Image (spheres, rainbow, N blue to C red):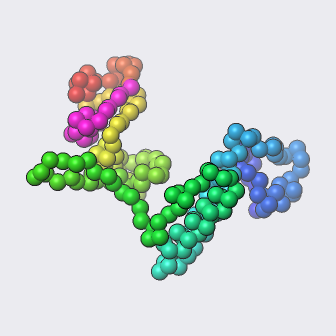
Amino acid sequence: MPLPPGLYDQPVTVGLDSELRELADELKRVEAADGAESARAFARVLGERLVRVLESFPKEERVAAQVRVVNELLGHLARAAEGVVLPEDHLVADGSVLRAVLAPVAPPRRATVPPAPGIPLSVSGLLVNGHNDRSIGPELKREIASADRVDLLCSFLKWSGLRVVHEELAALCQRGALRVLTTAYMSATERRAVEA
């Protein structure tokens, strides 16, 4: 299948290069890599392939095999650029993942883990409130409950929207910081919501 017309921002792999050779010169724009952006672009190529490799291992040995491959790659990278990858960067043998560090509380209370957002913290996600997607209200509540700071940028504030997360925002203000940037355009922002 020929490459569809459009804009690209994709490092040229050997496979892509063979496809590009099929196109006339006037129908493609290929440039030398920009040293300021090439590291992240090339890392995307490696990252995409690495995910596929790590997902390919049989379930019963997946975590152990993933840890082995990641540590082998880190070892190779450490040899490629001295002092950039350190021994403490390697994964622990059991492949464990840190999920929370809790602030100490005075007895008889017990430290509790806030509810984790449905979208992992290490992933960017877009919430669109579609029929088969996560509901924005409950997801925002979980995000706010686990945050120590929230910067809210919105076109306007309405009480009907704020009331959904008001309790979580009030709790956030007790433990962290909230900044809101909105407008008074067309008087759409409601005074009650701003005051709350």
Residue at horizontal 73%, vertical 51%? 11
149 in the magenta segment: no
Depth check: give the residue in front, 105 or 157.
Answer: 105
Give x and y (percent) for residue 188: 34, 23
Depth check: give the residue in front, 2 or 154.
Answer: 154
Residue at horizontal 41%, vertical 53%? 119
Looking at the image, residue 156 lies above or below residue 119: above
Instruction: Evaluate whether residue 137 shows in this view.
Output: no
Snapshot quadrant of residue 151: top left
Give x and y (percent) for residue 37: 69, 41
Task: Considering the whole magenta stretch, tell me its main secondary structure.
Answer: helix
Residue at horizontal 46%, vertical 49%? 125
Looking at the image, residue 56 lies above or below residue 183: below
Looking at the image, residue 106 lies above or below residue 177: below
Numbered range of the magenta stretch: 160-181
Residue 3 lies left or right of residue 169; in this view the side is right
Give x and y (percent) for residue 10: 71, 50
Residue 124 lies left or right of residue 1; in this view the side is left
